[in-house]
Image (cartoon, grey):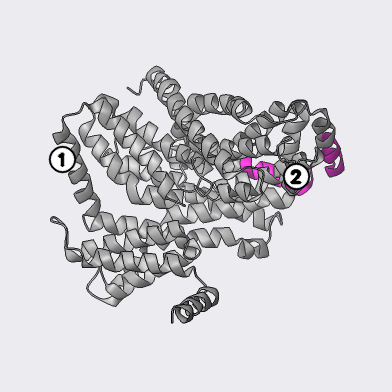
Amino acid sequence: MLERIKATFQYFNEAVPFRLVPAIIATVALFTLLLLPTPEGLTPKAWGLVAIFLTTILAIILKVMPIGVMAMMAIVIISLSQVTATSSGGAIADALSSFSNPLIWLIVASILISRGLKKTGLGSRIGLLFVSMLGKKTIGIGYGLAFCELLLAPFTPSNTARGGGIVHPVMRSIASTFDSDPEKGTQGKVGTYLALVNYHSNPITSAMFVTATAPNPLVVDYVARATNMDLHLSWINWALYMLLPGLACLLLMPLVIYLISPPELKSTPNAVEYARSELHKMGPLSPKEKVMMGTFALLLLLWANVPAMIFGPAFTLNPTVVAFLGLFILIITGTIDWDDVLSEKSAWDTLIWFGALVMMAEQLNKQGVITWFSEGMKVAIATSGIGWEAIALILLLVFVFSHYLFASTTAHISAMMLAFLTVGAQLIPGEYIVPFMLMMAAGSAIMMTLTHYATGTSPIIFGSGYVTLGTWWKVGLIMCVLELILFGVVGSTWWKVLGLW
């Protein structure tokens, strides 16, 4: 009998298009939550929405199926259960409401634009250019990869496309020239070090620009809402505030990784020759690369609101309008074509899962769940009698290190950030609200350092085999703590100079 049950389970586990055990765990979690008494202060429908939301996050963490499928599951369940409305028509309207949100389409259009970097070869050219200038030492190559990330970050809202799709192929090509290959067991020569620098550049640069990673516009929105619009981070303000602490992290990171995970080869003169050879093969800038550079320059000027600064507020453009303008330019010039747009799976996948998560976060707010949670946290912290400094530190650390439980930065931010910001805004003295909000904004990117599943870039680089799991988690923890300290010390000093507190 036991053997038959085991065989049946094995058959279904192989036959179904999802991971059976995680699916069972998620289902049990959903029904367990639904059977629990509704907490005081919430309606039964609000608690039902909480149960669906938490189950969706759990299913994403357990990787039951791709994140887009889990998001679609949430849309279906919300529509059928009618936890946001009194009819299925109203429920499906709520479930699909976020797909008209300009924020969602800003992200989609920007990911489509970043495809041009890879198609034209401009991304590889930039990486090779840095290596040709800095590549005589392994640590120099590391700095070349880091500065390549920094240069690309303002224009690539998909940190996965930037770190995993553009910089990582350059890093692997360089490693292979020194016969540093995981399949040969020689990854330690230079590959492990370069892979770690490749990855850890990604969270730092993601913290430095609104347009450097998909969830940042959501962070901007949450900060504005938590402060009653007193602090609304424009593109240029975010870049200015994060400039000095971000550069400090970027300058120290390759050196720190060099010390805790040193490469076997310290000197790499051949890297310069390799980079120059590849650049020679590429020849001069192609017309399409020039169009990409011109488009990027235009996007940067418009996202930075330069025309409005010169000619007045009538020339202010919504960031989503700017993104669509850039995309249209690339299409009509033939830099990318419509097939590129249609085949960019990551953009359309992001549209589904990001849209669904934003929708659930918005509905939780409308149903009063965020207010309920924030008030509960506020009371618990207020009655503890601790000072505001400890409150700020606890909120920051709990928010950042809870990312061990998440396989999606967006899911984490959607689930927790607004509540934490709201509590902080209520309990921290007004003159210190801005540095707290900026630390939380930086932390929402820094937390990507922690695990090999923390964001879309991490499984790409980890999956290439250059870094063991133990090394990844060790370096991730060290870098997370170090970057939080640097942002806390350098950042708070910089913000004081700027007169923000």
- The image shows residue 189, relative to residue 89, as above or below, that is above
- The image shows residue 427, relative to residue 470, as above or below, that is above
In the rendered structure, the answer to whether residue 160 lies left or right of residue 74 reads: right
Q: Earlier in the sequence, mark 1 or mark 2?
A: 2
Is 157 magenta? The answer is: no
Q: Position of residue 241 (x, y in %)?
A: 44, 28
How far is disc 1 from disc 2 in space, using C-alphas?
A: 54 Å
Q: Position of residue 240 (x, y in %)?
A: 47, 28
User: Is residue 26 or residue 270 the one in the foreground?
Assistant: 26
Q: Amino acid at mark 1?
A: Val
Residue 379 — which label? 1
- Mark nearest the camera among 1 and 2 is 2
Q: Count the marks.
A: 2
Q: Residue at x 24, y 70 (%)?
A: 85
Q: Residue at x 69, y 27 (%)?
A: 139
Is residue 313 shown to the viewer in this render? yes
Q: Amino acid at mark 2?
A: Asp
Is residue 356 shown to the viewer in this render? no
Location of residue 276 by image quarter? top right
Q: Which residue is mark 2?
A: 181
Location of residue 488 by image quarter? top left
Look at the numbered disc 2 and give the secondary structure of its residue: loop
Q: Residue at x 51, y 78 (%)?
A: 7
Q: Position of residue 11 (x, y in %)?
A: 53, 78
In the rendered structure, the answer to whether residue 381 lies left or right of residue 277 reads: left
User: Is residue 120 or residue 356 the one in the foreground?
Assistant: 356
User: Is residue 101 or residue 165 the one in the foreground?
Assistant: 165
Q: Quadrant of the N terminus?
A: bottom left
Highlighted magenta segment, given as a residue range: 276-297
Location of residue 466 by image quarter? top right
